[in-house]
Image (cartoon, helix red, strand yellow):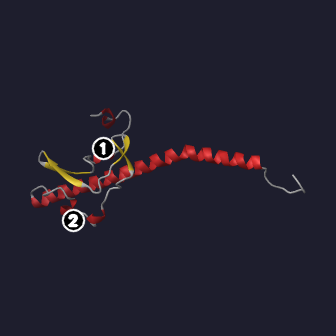
């Protein structure tokens, strides 16, 4: 060092920046996956809430909701217009990270019942699976 100045050499600074860059490269995919899991859990909770609203609708009116729009459930879900999926963001569907582009949840009727869906998937598709459980085994 010249003139008795104290500080870090260029090599030391480059080494520190390289280490920080490597740590960031390792952490970024983990953070991305954690965000996808949290979005999936939000979707599962939304769909379960809408399924409950469908049951309440059917119990009160004696019939399934008409149409496929969730707006018919407005008497059973507070601020239903704000219930929207994270369209365009990665989510976990049936254990696989994917991106669904549907901008809204819909109601799907069949076999005498109606379910809330997003991209054709019910709440169960967005719930995490664990090895050794019936959901992980495909049952």
State how far apart marks 2 and 1 are (Cα): 25 Å
Q: Residue at x 56, y 43 (%)?
A: 26
Place residue 94 in its image quadrant: top left
Q: Earlier in the sequence, mark 2 or mark 1?
A: 2
**Nearest the eye: 84 or 130:** 84
Q: Residue at x 67, y 49 (%)?
A: 17
Read off the residue under disc 1.
125
Locate residue 115, reporting x and y percent. 20, 50
Q: From the viewer's perspective, tell me whether residue 41 is left or right of residue 9.
A: left
Count residues near mark 2 (Cα–Cα under 10 Å), then give few for <14, some for 14-19, many for 20+: few
Q: From the viewer's perspective, tell me whether residue 11 is left or right of residue 78.
A: right
**Nearest the eye: 62 or 35:** 35
Locate residue 54, reporting x and y percent. 19, 56
Locate residue 76, reporting x and y percent. 21, 63
Read off the residue under disc 2.
74
Q: From the viewer's perspective, tell me whether residue 107 is left or right of residue 85.
A: left
Q: Residue at x 27, y 52 (%)?
A: 48
Locate residue 13, reporting x and y percent. 73, 50
């Amino acid at each position: 060092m010249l003139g008795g100045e104290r500080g870090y050499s260029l090599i030391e600074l480059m080494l520190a920046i390289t280490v920080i860059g490597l740590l960031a490269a390792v952490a970024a995919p983990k953070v991305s996956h954690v965000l996808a899991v949290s979005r999936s859990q939000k979707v599962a909770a939304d769909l379960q809430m809408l399924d409950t609203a469908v049951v309440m609708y059917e119990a009160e009116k004696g019939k399934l909701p008409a149409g496929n729009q969730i707006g018919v459930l407005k008497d059973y879900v507070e601020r239903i217009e704000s219930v929207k999926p994270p369209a365009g963001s990665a989510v976990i569907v049936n254990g696989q990270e994917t991106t669904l582009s549907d901008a809204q949840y819909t109601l799907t009727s069949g076999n005498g019942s109606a379910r809330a869906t997003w991209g054709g998937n019910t709440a169960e598709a967005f719930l995490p699976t664990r090895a050794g459980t019936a959901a992980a085994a495909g049952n």
